[in-house]
Image (cartoon, helix red, strand yellow):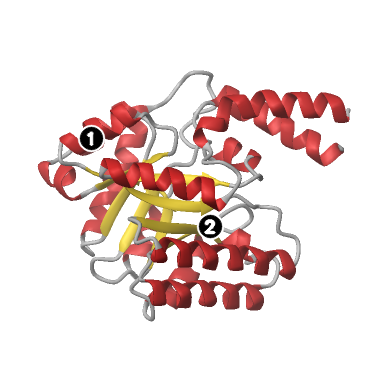
Amino acid sequence: MREEHRLIKGLVYRVVRKHIAGATLKSALDEVGKLNALGANTTLTFLNEKVSDNTKAKYNSNAYIQIIKQVSRLHMKCSISARLSQLGFNIDEECAERCLAEILDAARKGSIKVWIEAGRGVGQDRLIDAYAKYMADSDMLGIEMSVNNITYMKKLAGVIKKGAPVRLTRNPYFFGDEREGRKDTKEYLNAYATSIKELSRSKAEICIQESDDRLISKVAGISKRNQRDLIFGMPFGYSFKKINRLLKMKMKVDVYVPYGQDWIPYAIYGLAGNRLRRIAMAVLDGEKQV
């Protein structure tokens, strides 16, 4: 079982490795530097989802604080994105809030933007509540939201400050996406358009986190304002040629750069492709068994 799991994991990593900026912060910062040189902004995230106690949550918060210090010292065009699940919001909320407060304090000192995501086991309601609690005291705080439920988008629109940064993404299991090879572009486009309209009332700074070329073009084409004002986020591993094409169109580009050894959950929930997702989930099940 262990040998079989090791071989499958190695094969999956060969498929996803171009989407992971290495295992160390140094390797990730090297990639951030290359993207900055192209003219793209970046968002750096640490892949470590195995949080079962406060010690591991504190370890993750310290990792993000070190990232902030390094990015600030090197004057990079780079924000960070932390998942609330990494800080233990589904384990010990009091400890988790201390971890988040320490990260935001470091971000203020280093003038680095921090995005917060929900992560596994943390709902959108809890994410919005945490954001609302800390946004008033931090101009460096952004939030990542799924476009799969307009109710949450309306709740967010009711609490965000004018001009606040919001990253919109999609849930890979929404809109019947489990059919092999199928992507309901129209459904996704409508979800993005509805969310943009809702958030535009608050004049939010909106980033669309998307890997589908066609969908990026369609969202940008909704209006001239979209192409001018929206930020288009894409996963690391997107070709430099495609990034350059967007930049030449005067579109704002932000590349989501993950690094670390705990890459399997990101392969499952963050990378496109149902076939790859099923294989990665099989690997995760194998890890639980061995």
Report the residue that reaches farthest toward the bottom. 137
Q: Which residue is mark 1?
A: 246
Judging depth in this view, the residue of 54 and 124 nearest the camera is 54
Query: Horizontal placement of 244 versus 92: left or right?
Result: left
| Label 1, residues with CA under 10 Å away: few <14, some 14-19, many ≥20 | some
Judging depth in this view, the residue of 80 and 181 nearest the camera is 80
Task: Give percent across and percent down for residue 161.
Answer: 29, 71
Amino acid type at circle 2 is Ala
Secondary structure of the residue carrying tag 2 is loop
- From this view, report whether residue 65 is shown above or below residue 40: below
The residues bearing labels 2 and 1 have C-alpha atoms spaced at a distance of: 29 Å
Query: Horizontal placement of 91 versus 29: left or right?
Result: right
- From this view, report whether residue 10 is shown above or below residue 92: above
Q: Which numbered disc, 2 or 1, marks the residue that appears first in the sequence?
A: 2
Q: Which residue is mark 2?
A: 118
Quarter that holds the N terminus: top right
Amino acid type at circle 1 is Leu
Task: Give percent across and percent down for residue 249.
Answer: 15, 35
* Residue 147 in view (yes/no): no
- Identify the residue shown where x is 18% and y is 45%: 226
Query: Horizontal placement of 108 versus 11: left or right?
Result: left
Quarter that holds the C terminus: top right
- Identify the residue shown where x is 23% and y is 48%: 230
Judging depth in this view, the residue of 240 and 37 nearest the camera is 37
- Identify the residue shown where x is 14% and y is 46%: 228
Task: Give percent across and percent down for residue 97.
Answer: 58, 75
- From this view, report whether residue 33 is shown above or below residue 173: below
Secondary structure of the residue carrying tag 1 is helix
Badge number at residue 29? none
Q: How many marks?
A: 2
